[in-house]
Amino acid sequence: MINLLSAATSVPQNVFKTTELVGSLMHKLSPELINTISALGVDQRYSTLQNYPDFLCGKPKIATSSTTDLGVAATRRCIEKWGGDPNRIGLLVAATNTPDQMLPCLAAEIMGKTHGLLSRSLRTVSMQAQGCAVLLKSIEVAQWYLAANPKELAIVVMAEAHTPYVAPLLREEYSGYRELIRLRKDGRLDPDQFEQQRLDTTFVIQSMLFGDGAVALLVGTEEGKPAFGPISHLTNDQPNDMNLLRMVSNSSHPLLKGRPQYFMQPNVPTRGAHYAVTTVNSVLRHPDSPVSGLDEVDDCLIHTGSKKILDGVCSQLDLHPESAKVHGSYQVLQRYGNLSSASTGFMLAEKNEWSGPAIVVGFGVGFTASAGIMNFN
């Protein structure tokens, strides 16, 4: 088991309320679609784009920071918060689903901007395109390294800038999913038109759901701090689950101009809940687990897929959405949006008191999920 010594987050300087974004696009969005956006559970999000509302309306993007910038800032803050000698850090694990460029990877980019802070001889591991469940996998990589080098430390960084990846919303009108289904049944949309408009509706929702931010976790084998472990994983429980969430590298959509494109199947909430519940039950049954049920944990830190997904996971875990156990999950979704790989890290960084054990749950692209217990040694 390894201990969490320090945690810090970083967000861009630009913050946009959901009401502000909807207001800038009000003439394009149907009432049903506006209701869908309101039900996402996101009040605001931070963006690396200074002009995010204008960008959604088709203006050129104006970026004030990037995925790498956010990762570097979180790394610096995490080490400063800890206050020890950074030369003790022997491993950097960096993960992102939204890299600034294909190569070099995020870990190398962070190293390039931390001269004088991180040793040039430390080991680096980049875990890119690993989806939303990568944090606990990264923690395990650090755990394996520290098992061989117990006197050293490792820093794990999750950094995401989703908003530059979304498509501008240039159609004159966008409808909700149920409206599109009715139009298809009435014969007013042919199959190709239906699929295109359904995809465009997905673009609207993605533009309102995701946010930008980074978190850094410093871990070591020093006692007296919360410890990770045991951890459980599940990947591709059913063969078709691999395509629940996917991103193509070169989109054919004209508005994306060859940039990556994200696809999400409608049954993600139900399958995501299944994966979350399965990994939670698995880790609770682990012989090294300090608890045997969720009634024994103080907090359940669940990935911020959306309010619907969080509600579904809570329902299957017999947790009330208004309970204190899941307050941190809904709060991070509300304040930052879906941060993919960084979401549960934000919850850890914002958790001020450790009076008892907590469970961390992530799930996403793969399709994969991870759950882990955190407790004092």
Image (spheres, helix red, strand yellow):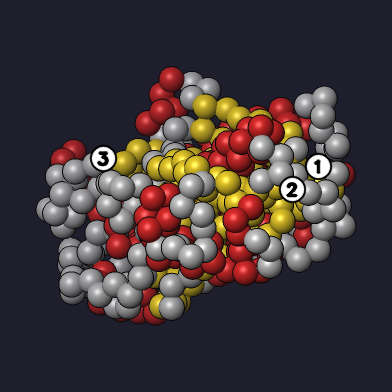
Give the image location of residue 206, x and y in percent. Answer: 37, 57
Residues at marks 2 and 1, CA–CA distance in whole angstroms: 21 Å
Residue closest to the eye, 115 or 290 = 115
Residue beneath the point at 42% across and 57% down: 110
Q: As displayed, is residue 19 above or below residue 228?
A: below
Residue topped by disc 3 = 248
Residue closest to the eye, 141 or 363 = 141
Nearer-N-terminus badge (2/1): 2
Residue beneath the point at 54% across and 66% down: 76
Q: As displayed, is residue 154 above or below residue 75?
A: above
**Mark carried by residue 3:** 2
Quarter of the figure that contains the C terminus: top right
Nearer-N-terminus badge (3/1): 3
Residue closest to the eye, 183 or 164 = 164
**Mark carried by residue 367:** none
**Mark carried by residue 294:** 1
Q: Is mark 1 on a helix, strand or loop?
A: helix
For discs 3 and 1, the disc positioned in front in the rendered view:
3
Give the image location of residue 87, x and y in percent. Answer: 60, 56
Q: What element carries label 2?
A: strand
For discs 2 and 1, the disc positioned in front in the rendered view:
2
Mark 1 surroundings: few (<14), some (14-19) or many (≥20) residues within 10 A: some
Residues at marks 3 and 1, CA–CA distance in whole angstroms: 38 Å
Q: Is mark 3 on a helix, strand or loop?
A: strand
Q: Is residue 135 visible?
A: no
Residue beneath the point at 43% across and 49% down: 107
